[in-house]
Image (cartoon, grey):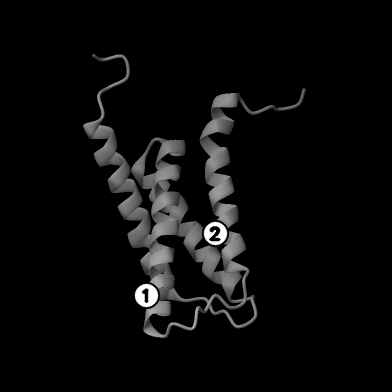
């Protein structure tokens, strides 16, 4: 008997997998420099923050708990930096893991704030 994931499980985890794959794809690009000097650095770090904020929100949605979501997100951030160390012209950076962690926290907190402000399902 084959194990077939439920539609609910797929709807929770496919966005996480898809978003992680997108992050992986961007990490595979050897040079993302725009030639804008300092602005390039700022934009790339803002991208890290944003990518991982979205991942954090998706992980909370999938796991339904903040701590496991954050832990999985950190593990992915570390693996992303290891992956980048094998891409030409790229380097793995502990600073980027820290920025990714801030992004994860931002996404997790933002999702919680939105959930608290929305009326409960079925309530009028």
Task: Read off the residue under disc 1.
Answer: 42
Residue occupying the point 64% across, 75% down:
86
Residue placed at 37% from the left, 68% from the top? 98
Residue nearest the observer in this picture, 32 or 78: 32
Q: What element carries label 1?
A: helix
Residue 119 pos. (x, y %): 25, 24
Judge from the rendering whether residue 13 lies leftward or rightward of residue 120; answer left or right. right
What residue sits 45% from the left and 54% below the top?
Answer: 73
Q: Mark 2 points at which residue?
A: 23
N-terminal of the pair, mark 1 or mark 2, is: 2
Q: In this view, does 100 lie above or below 42?
A: above
Residue furthest to the right in view is 1
Circle 2 crowding by C-alpha within 10 Å: few under 14, some 14–19, many from 20: some
Viewer-closest of 38 and 66: 38
Question: For residue 117, which quarter of the picture?
Answer: top left
Q: Quadrant of residue 21?
A: bottom right
72 sits left or right of 117 in the view: right
Residue 41, percent from left and from top: 41, 78
Residue drawn at the location 64% of the way across and 28% of the way down:
5
**Mark 2, secondary structure of its residue:** helix
Where residue 33 sits in the image (x, y, percent)?
52, 79
* Residue 48 rendering spot, x and y as whole percentages: 43, 65
Q: Quadrant of residue 9?
A: top right
Q: The N terminus appears in which quarter of the rendering?
A: top right
Above or below, 32 against 22 in this view is below
Q: In this view, does 122 lie to the left or right of 84?
A: left
In the picture, the disc for residue 80 is none
Location of the C terminus by quadrant is top left
Mark 1: few, some, or many residues within 10 Å (few <14, many ≥20)?
few
**Figure check: 88 above or below 56:** below
């Amino acid at each position: 008997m084959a194990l077939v994931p439920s539609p609910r499980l797929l709807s929770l985890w496919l966005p996480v997998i898809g978003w992680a794959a997108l992050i992986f794809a961007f990490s595979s690009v050897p040079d993302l420099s725009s030639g804008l000097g300092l602005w390039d650095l700022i934009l790339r770090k803002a991208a890290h923050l944003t990518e991982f904020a979205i991942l954090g929100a998706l992980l909370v949605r999938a796991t339904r708990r903040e701590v496991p979501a954050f832990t999985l997100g950190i593990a992915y951030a570390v693996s992303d930096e290891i992956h980048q160390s094998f891409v030409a012209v790229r380097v793995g950076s502990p600073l980027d893991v820290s920025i990714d962690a801030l992004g994860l926290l931002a996404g997790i907190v933002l999702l919680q704030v939105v959930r608290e402000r929305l009326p409960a399902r079925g309530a009028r």
